[in-house]
Image (cartoon, rainbow, N blue to C red):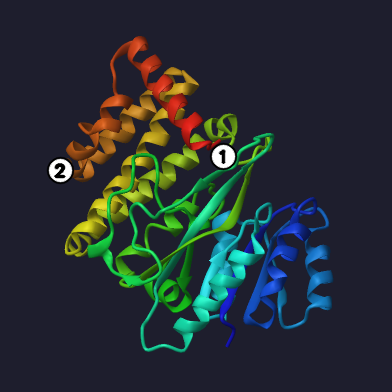
Amino acid sequence: MKLLSIAIPSYNSEGYLSKCIESLLPGANDVEILVVNDGSKDRTSEIGHEYEAKYPGIVRVIDKENGGHGSAVNAGIDNATGLFFKVVDSDDWVKESAYLAILEKLREFAGSKDVLDMLISNFVYEKEGAEKKKVMRMGHALPKDRLFGWDEVGHFIKGQYILMHSVIFRTKLLKECGIRLPEHTFYVDNIFVYEPLPFVKNMYYMDVNFYRYYIGREDQSVNEKVMISRVDQQLRVNHIMIDYLVANKKKICKEKRLYQYMINYLDIITTVSSIMLIISGTEENLKKKDDLWHYLKDKDPSIYRRLRFGILGNAMNLPGKGGRKISVEGYRIAQRFFKFN
């Protein structure tokens, strides 16, 4: 059995796939690199197969019909044979020193009686044109370099949460929790790091800058204009997260810190949906914003009240054009601070 399975969801990635794979090869025989070619129309599959031929037993290509990012992640989970599982997007890469340190830690747990469900590390916003790179650390909220449970998780600052870039899950946990990401939908990485959480008991945080998250291409899914054009997909993810939290509320509430974290995560996602709809400025999208909040209210009035009358909910629902302008300005300040989009 491999120590770590790394899925690379890839669609028309010929321009950067090699850099991603090369950054993962130092894992050698401890890893399997699953290049999931999601129906690409360029040389993505060919590049993947070239690496598969050169590194047999390490690189494996999964060619499939186009189904979107979520479908590619699903295929990665289905084909993973490693003890642990990681997603690395095809336009991103990892830092070798941090990578090797993480593999060493995973190796320790593989031979231990302690079960590790989720390993967390830092990621770096590799923003195009930015001189200074923003590092997203978790040390203020998570104990370092030791196993811990939800009862020891502290408070994350507003606007920060554990992204897909930060996590490595135990593969069996992902398979047992039954996670299936929706097809032909962007922003499903939020579901990937949300739905497994009630199954996570033991975590470990390493304060190393492992994952390099590239942002800056105009066609990228997190580009603001692209997000607005795909806002219905963002809303779909938002609804799925609301439904999941409401359906599993009794189980989640047994862990107070877990419930707080999942509420706060939903708060941020609902804020992102709301602000994209506000920025678009169309009457149709402003109505979709109201519909989103009504959907939450109908699903669970107590969660609705907590989000609607919290700091972010109030900021997203200020009345009139003047209120919407204030909402956007607040978002711009956060954007400059956290360096996202």
Q: Are marks 2 and 1 in contact (CB under 8 Å)?
A: no
- Is disc 1 placed on a helix, strand or loop? loop
The earlier-in-sequence mark between 2 and 1 is: 1
Is residue 212 visible from the viewing direction of this image?
A: yes
Q: State the residue in front, 252 or 71.
A: 252
Whole-percent x, y for residue 259 in the image = 23, 55
User: Toward which corner of the image does residue 278 lie, by quadrant?
Assistant: top left
Q: Is residue 187 left or right of residue 226?
A: left
- Given this view, does label 2 or label 1 mark the residue nearer the observer? 1
Amino acid type assigned to the residue bearing label 2 in the image: Ser
Q: Quadrant of the N terminus?
A: bottom right
Q: Quadrant of the C terminus?
A: top right
Please give the label number shown on residue 302: 2
Amino acid type assigned to the residue bearing label 1 in the image: Val
User: Toward which corner of the image does residue 218 lie, by quadrant?
Assistant: top right
Q: Is residue 139 left or right of residue 79?
A: left
Residue occupying image coordinates x 25% and y 63%: 152
Other residues around mark 1 within 10 Å, as few (<14) / some (14–19) / many (≥20)? some
Tell me the CA gap for discs 2 and 1: 31 Å
Residue occupying image coordinates x 62% and y 56%: 89
Whole-percent x, y for residue 5 in the image = 59, 74
- Is disc 2 placed on a helix, strand or loop? helix
Is residue 249 visible from the viewing direction of this image?
A: no
Residue occupying image coordinates x 39% and y 40%: 159
Please give the label number shown on residue 222: 1
